[in-house]
Amino acid sequence: MKYLFVTILIGLLGLSGCGDADDATRLNTFSSLTAIEITAENTQIANLTSTQLKASGNFSGLFSRDITADVVWESSDQTVATLSNDAETRGRVAGIFPGTTSITATVDGITDSFSLTVSNATISSLAISPLTTTIPKGLTAQFQATGNFSDATSQDITFDVDWSSSDPLAASVSNAVGSKGLASALAVGTSDISASFEGIDTSTLMTVSAARLDSLSISPADPSLLSLSSRQFTATGSFSDASTLDITNQVTWASKFPTFASVSNSAGSQGLVATLLNGVTTISARLDGVNAATGLSVTGGNLATIQVLPAKSSFIHIDPVIPLQMSAEGTFDNGARDISDQVTWSSTVPAVATISPQGIVTTVGAGETEIQAVNGTVPATTKLTVVAATFNSGTLVVRPASAELPTLAKGTSLKFTASGQFGDGSSRDLTSVVTWSSSAAGIAEIGNSGLGKGVVSGLAAGTTNINADFRGLDSDSANLDVTAPSLVALSIDNPSPSLLPGASLQFTATATYGDATTQNVSADVVWSSVDSSVAIFDAFQSANGEILAVDTGSVEIMASLGEETDTLTVEVP
């Protein structure tokens, strides 16, 4: 079984025997592959407006996690735009004066930058949505303001407008940070909800009805979830006027047996269920004396032991320091799976290395420390030795090598790796820290950020050279031949699709082409499971076809590529 390891965030980690370096389609379990990627709805905003930026931490090409609240945000020119690092508005950038500034997000030495332009456009008109809404007394409704500007652009400015209500006794609307535009239905009647920005005003009608809540429903209904996992539940209200509303954030949630699973009532995470131990509980929602409940079966076994990976490791300490990611593997009744986001991390000697709540290690100086991971009463430790070492020029190697001349079908991808030798005699995986290039970008392009780091995508028939650069030192070229045959069939390969709850199973998708060639396309197909209560494609490994069994039953899984699909039935006894 291939364990679900979370691997390294933009770091250098080398271990002997960590997979076949010559296999460009196999992810090295211990490779230190990571980056931060900043995303935004707008790369340009109007002066005096703002937008929310998001930082995603990409973990070794396996998964991406939102780390907006963990990074430190900065603007290179604060006369153009400023960034918030306050808890409620972290990552929100505000335009101060027309111009361009570089936005950076940094955590534990890992940085990404984002170019933001503040235009001199002025507001032309405002629109509020929803246009009209009817809300039962005692509930809330979220309004959104969209600004249309003189340069023909439009932008969500819900956070930037001033909100008001014509009849605050019937309905109030919030101007508080964190709840801008949230209206509360206070008494039966009507009120105009207004938004104002730079002299432009608009409004919409909100009606507060006397409709009673007749019933509640919770989804998903009677699900099964693995222990030490989470899932969002929703509550829908049905009212006496035949209307229905999503009231997930307004009900009071409860778990009958919180030892097995808890459910959140905290702002921003209402209805989020976190499972703990094997067992059965009931998740309930209550509002105005109306109740609803659904069963929840927690499967997959209880946590017995934790192993911190990599174990007893030595890491390079070079300037500048390149952080790396530790992972925690939990052993359960029916197998092992990654629980890195379910443990508390610590380092016994911070002068050697520190570790963040996300398991990101930053080396400080040469020496030894212990990295600890704890979940409840289950602890685990591993020794970490930090050594000073310099890179040996001329040792940068790219795989697959030139002599191998790999072939890639148009529309599919191939993972390249880079490694190098250091002064302490070790060989380290450098895939995530080199700069990749393709000599013929029209034939094949190679990613240099996030999940696509080192991943080549075939675009057209032809041959290209793949190169890697580490601090100005180039590698030998690796040739790649891209073909353009027609896809004629897709098949899922696994001889024994049966596994116990909590166990995982790796599937392989193989494409057959018109020229009689075949190719492993597991990373290129879209994997899906029709019943997540029986089995799921885990978020960490879904791109590669690794499935996790959840509960007893039979489920059909599917792989799709282009116009071709294949299905397979998985049995969980």
Image (tube, rainbow, N blue to C red):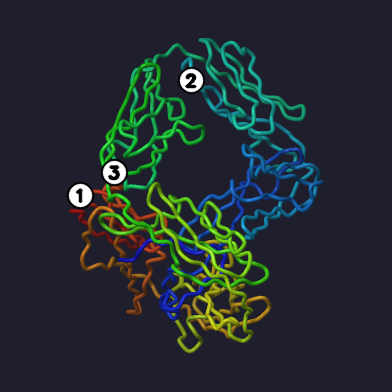
* Residue where numbered disc 1 is placed: 553
* Residue where numbered disc 3 is placed: 298
- Look at discs 3 and 2 and give the one toward the viewer: 3
Q: CA distance from mark 1 to mark 3?
A: 15 Å
Residue 502 x %, y %: 28, 54
**Classed neighbour count for the residue bearing mark 1: other residues with Cα under 10 Å, few (<14), some (14–19), many (≥20):** some
Query: Quadrant of the image for the N terminus?
Result: bottom left
Question: Considering the numbered disc 2 on the image, is that residue within a helix, a strand or a loop?
Answer: loop
Q: CA distance from mark 2 to mark 1?
A: 40 Å
Judge from the rendering whether residue 272 lies leftward or rightward of residue 127; answer left or right: left
Residue 3 x %, y %: 35, 63
Identify the residue at horizontal 27%, vertical 50% (top origin). Answer: 301
Q: Earlier in the sequence, mark 3 or mark 2?
A: 2
**Classed neighbour count for the residue bearing mark 3: other residues with Cα under 10 Å, few (<14), some (14–19), many (≥20):** many
Looking at the image, residue 472 lies above or below residue 187: below
Q: Earlier in the sequence, mark 2 or mark 1?
A: 2
* Residue where numbered disc 2 is placed: 139
Judge by depth and name the residue closer to the eye, 91 or 262.
Answer: 262
Identify the residue at horizontal 49%, vertical 77% (top origin). Answer: 461
Q: Earlier in the sequence, mark 1 or mark 3?
A: 3
